[in-house]
Amino acid sequence: MNVHIRAFEVADEDAVVTLWEGAGLTRPWNDPRADIRRKLTVQPELFLVAVDGDEVVGSVMAGYDGHRGWLYYLAAAQTHRGQGVGRALVTEAERLLEALGCPKVQLMVRPDNTGARGFYDALGYEPFETWATGRRLIVDGPGGPA
Ligand SMILES: CC(C)(COP(=O)(O)OP(=O)(O)OC[C@H]1O[C@@H](n2cnc3c(N)ncnc32)[C@H](O)[C@@H]1OP(=O)(O)O)[C@@H](O)C(=O)NCCC(=O)NCCS
């Protein structure tokens, strides 16, 4: 695999949004460009991309909140699935989180995403029962937050 992992750079934005759309990770209520802009203000070094040459072929957005590490927006390009890109991204995110003293990493998977469940099982992640809830504080308009 001729792929390496590095921190997201501003010039990657279009490619990352295309990657997320192709991986089915975007939702109408989440403006991906606003999500990227916000992440660049909080632990931007934990927002990683996998690149093959100059092509973005994977991403993961990690964060440490002082109690748990979280993973979001994990994706591998369709052209590069099954080649270890997803594993490499998660492994590097884990390494960076652990270096911050983060004791546990976890993530949320949408109920219908059975593929992601199989992937995380293969990486030794252990599912746990929880009831997830939330409340939106900022509603993004067209073009993202002001
Ligand atoms: C999930 C995803 C990132 C996996 O990326 P990938 O690069 O194909 O995965 P890898 O090649 O690194 O696979 C790592 C291991 O997981 C296993 N695996 C991957 N997908 C799997 C699946 N659907 N079911 C079971 N095992 C799976 C692989 O066999 C491999 O095992 P091994 O290392 O023991 O051989 C990719 O399928 C994807 O982008 N999916 C769409 C977006 C998504 O659902 N993201 C997660 C949101 S929570």
Image (cartoon, grey):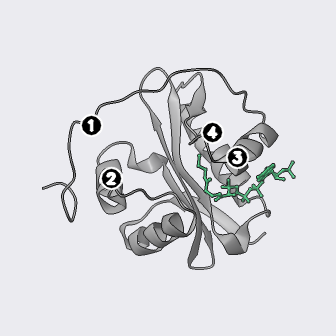
In front here: 56 or 133?
Answer: 133
**First in sequence: mark 1 vs mark 4:** 4
Cβ of mark 3 under 8 Å from ligand 1: the answer is yes
Q: CA distance from mark 1 to mark 2?
A: 10 Å
Q: Amino acid at mark 1?
A: Arg
35 up-or-down from 100: above or below: below
Q: Are marks 1 and 2 in contact (CB under 8 Å)?
A: yes
Extreme residue toward the left, this view: 146
- Left or right: where does residue 58 sit relative to residue 40? right
Q: CA distance from mark 2 to mark 4?
A: 31 Å
Residue wearing tag 2: 29
Query: Mark number for residue 114?
Result: 3
Nearer the observer: mark 4 or 3; the answer is: 3
Q: CA distance from mark 3 to mark 1?
A: 26 Å
Q: Residue at x 77, y 40 (%)?
A: 123
Q: Amino acid at mark 2?
A: Trp
Which image quadrant for residue 85?
Answer: bottom right
**First in sequence: mark 2 vs mark 4:** 2
- Left or right: where does residue 94 sit relative to residue 135? right
Dot 4 falls on a residue whose secondary structure is helix
**First in sequence: mark 3 vs mark 1:** 3
Nearer the observer: mark 1 or 4; the answer is: 1
Dot 2 falls on a residue whose secondary structure is loop
Q: Position of residue 9 (x, y in %)?
A: 41, 65
How busy is the neighbourhood of tag 4: few (under 14 within 10 Å), some, or many (20 plus)?
Answer: few
Dot 3 falls on a residue whose secondary structure is helix
Query: Mark number for residue 95?
Result: 4
**First in sequence: mark 1 vs mark 2:** 2
Residue wearing tag 1: 136
- Left or right: where does residue 78 sit relative to residue 30? right
**First in sequence: mark 4 vs mark 3:** 4
Dot 1 falls on a residue whose secondary structure is loop
